Amino acid sequence: MSALRRYLPAFHDVLGARVLVVGAGAVGTRKIETLLAGGARVTVVAKEFSRSVEDRAARGDLTVHRGEFHSGQMEGAELVFAATPDRALNRRVSAEARRRRIPVNVADSPEECTFLLPAVIRGDEFTVAISTGGRHPGAAKAVREFIEEHRAKISVRLERGRRRKRIAAEPGKVYIVGAGPGDPDLLTVRALGLLRSADAVIHDYLVPREILSLAPAKAVRISFARRGRTAGHGAILKQNAIHEAMVRLAREGKSVVRLKSGDPLVFGRGGEEAEHLSREGIPFEIVPGITAAMGCAAAAAIPLTHRERSSSVTFVAGHETEEKGGSAVDWSLLPKDGTLAIYMGVGRVAAIAGELGGAGFPPETPFAIVENGSRVQQRILRGTLSDLPRIALGSGVRSPAILFVGRTAALLPYENTEETSDEPVAQSV
Ligand code: SAH
């Protein structure tokens, strides 16, 4: 009706407001209850009062004037409601309120209103208001019922849409963060937030530049790692240097992200670093990442477990140890009906094939090698154990690569592939 007309979606803003309600029948009573719930100071003018309004008056929750409405009762009111069955009276109340420039709502008469009350649904974290401009209250009610029925789905949408609270690395603290297998999209939200706010980043050689570039340009970047062997004396020196750097930077008051490929606690010495920080009294937090086995399994559509093909998955280190003068692993102890994910093994793949055979893994056991999993250079090679050395050496597989062994490593029927030959396949992806 007028440009003045506004919607009052809820009574949040009536706390302490002086509100005049004319009429105390069923409609008036509903309005009065809502206003009181919102903390309004309510005065009611009516000839007859509903039972609940009488009770409220007796308890002193509101003020009542019994008898005819007169304009002086509007003095000082900030909002007016007319809810009597007498249309002419409602019109008079509305006219007087408008003359005094007090917002007014008349029940069932949108033309007399300067504001409207939509149907309202309140959730824990949201309020939905529906209005048909006062013309079709029944339609608004139907929509409200629909929304009520879909409350749970609305909550899910809200959660999805809610802005994440800003993640910021704290000064003087070390975050031991998993960077995942290489694709920046596979960082966790927390890893990304910490990286973006870090003063210093100490990273492994396996963490690609795309991920390092997410840290602020002014952040200190340190890498102690060198390619090649990381066992023995050199590795101990390197690890000590990392420990010292973490502690020094944290004591300087920097926020430090210790960024490791995959997950920090899987073949990553994250445990040793946490122990060292704890000994030195430096606060730290470990942020998990997608380990290579998981990232590469997803890339090659290898189910690590499968109802018919594998009921266990074992992460094993394939490199040799100096102390043992050979494999670090007793292959005969590993389950032959599960999936093996062998890290750091491509350098001695022929030896591993022999060791697996010696441990009783049948030559027809499928394998898959994922090289540079989740990165642009990703390659996937497949075959059976009897062909493992030939295929791996023939295609020049290089680190980082992971070797899967087990029935799950075979091409699965659901995987979309063009190769259909019986020959072992080497695919580039
Ligand atoms: N903490 C890491 C593992 C570090 S050990 C993690 O949880 O993934 C390094 C080994 O991880 C490599 O020798 C290789 O076997 C494996 N690896 C890491 N990134 C890889 C990638 N993108 N593709 C294939 N293998 C990877």
Image (cartoon, rainbow, N blue to C red):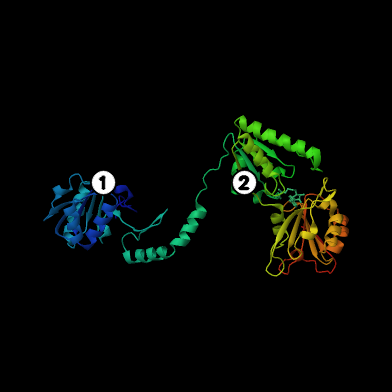
Q: Which mark is residue 202?
A: none
- The answer to which image quadrant residue 258 occupies is top right
Q: Residues within 10 Å of mark 2 (few under 14, many from 20)?
A: some
Coordinates of residue 151 in the picture (x, y in percent): 43, 61
Task: State the image coordinates of residue 180 (x, y, percent, origin top left).
Answer: 68, 49
Alpha carbon distance from label 1 to label 2: 50 Å
Dot 1 alpha-carbon crowd within 10 angstroms: few under 14, some 14 to 19, many 20 or more: some
Q: Determine if residue 136 is in view.
A: no
Asked if residue 30 shows in the view, the reply is yes
Give the SS element for disc 2. strand
Amino acid type, mark 1: Ala
Side of 70 where 274 appears, left or right = right
Write the residue at 56% across / 40% down. 168
Given residues 171 and 339, the one toward you in this image is 339
Give the residue number, with chain letter if any, for mark 2.
287
| On screen, residue 95 above or below 425 | above
Question: Which residue is the site of mark 1?
Answer: 17
